Image (cartoon, helix red, strand yellow):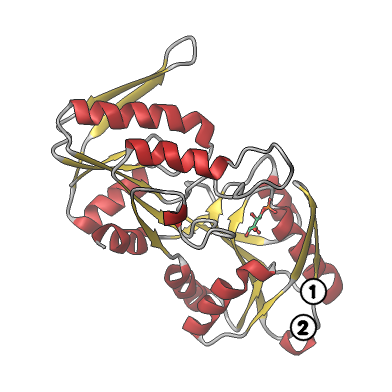
Amino acid sequence: MKFCAWPGNEAICASLARALGAATFALETRHFPDGESYVRIAGDCGDEVAIVCSLDHPDEKTVPLLVLADALRAEGATRVGLIAPYLAYLRQDRQFKPGEAVSSRTFAKIISAHLDWLVTVDPHLHRYKSLSEVYSIKTQVCHAAPAIAAWIKANIEKPLLIGPDSESAQWVGDIAARIGAPSITLEKTRKGDREVEVSVPHIEKWQSHTPVLADDIISTGKTMLAAAKRLRDEHALMPVCIGVHAIFAGDAYDELLKAGARVVTCNAITHPSNGIDLTEVIAAGVRA
Ligand code: R5P
């Protein structure tokens, strides 16, 4: 298998290729003056290809990604897979209002029609139990929990793992169990895309611990911000905020830093806050 990186994914592509003993080849990409994408395969792609492309900003990336998959087949690839450490379009997994598009289904159909397999990390599966409910190609889900647990163990003294909402309870519990740390879950009410309220249960008995908020996606950052401010203002605790997928829409990252939080993310999406390497967990997923 040979690997190529969609621009922005070079570092994780190179370290995955190294971990798997695979070769890489280069791509040339740019935009025509009218905004259309130009893609050129600048090397021998071989028979079996893995494209490494995290799907943050998915609307910008999807068309050129499909163009690339098609071009690889024209150059002789017989199987073209996608390693998307962050997989987009999973949150609209049902109609919340009449007439709404269930974009997760459409996106999965498009990807399944053009790629042969998909490897991703902690996809936002909420009402879907597994990706196979919407993806018709072979999919492999990797979990960041072992890498996050190892990082916390090496860097945080007496951690108290905190999940910002009930959805996060299971995997925050998993991280905590790996390092023998306690964990609690907060209650979140989302009132709009950027309006989140979080309530903190009694945490007095954990006062000597370092709170570690862990969530799968940091998008607007409002979930992390609401939880961090509550911990700071009501309990004089400033947490370490850990996210798997560093989307940070708008000024989300700056706002969290301004609030005094230490922010550490996994390298599923390239971002200055990346401190937790997912190479091993993704490599294991590709092997599988
Ligand atoms: C929600 O279901 C997710 O697990 C995250 O809590 C959510 O996506 C975070 O979004 P935001 O950063 O916009 O509050």
* Residue 255 is at least partly visible in this image: yes
Identity of the residue drawn at 81% across and 74% down: 236
Q: Position of residue 154 (x, y in %)?
A: 47, 76
Identify whether 277 is placed above or below 32.
below
Horizontally, residue 71 falls left or right of residue 202, namely left
Identity of the residue drawn at 28% across and 28% down: 70
Q: Quadrant of residue 207?
A: bottom right
For badge 2, the amino acid type reads Ile
Identify whether 9 is placed above or below 265.
above
Identity of the residue drawn at 21% across and 57% down: 20
Q: Count residues near mark 2 (Cα–Cα under 10 Å), then give few for <14, some for 14-19, many for 20+.
A: few
Horizontally, residue 170 falls left or right of residue 199, namely left
Kindly give the residue lying farthest to the right in the view shown. Answer: 234
For badge 1, the amino acid type reads Val
Q: Quadrant of the C terminus?
A: bottom left
Identity of the residue drawn at 81% across and 83% down: 202
Q: Position of residue 231 (x, y in %)?
A: 78, 71
Residue at disc 2, CB closer than 8 Å to ligand 1: no
Q: Quadrant of residue 52?
A: top left
Q: Nearer the viewer, residue 196 or 153?
A: 196
| Residue 236 - label | none
Q: Nearer the viewer, residue 136 or 198?
A: 136
| Residue 200 - label | 1
* Residue 8 is at least partly visible in this image: no
Identify whether 61 is placed above or below 121.
above
Answer whether labels 1 and 2 touch (C-beta < 8 Å).
yes
Secondary structure at numbered mark 1 = loop
Q: Position of residue 203 (x, y in %)?
A: 77, 83
Secondary structure at numbered mark 2 = loop
Distance of mark 1 from mark 2, alpha carbons?
8 Å
Residue identifier under label 2: 203
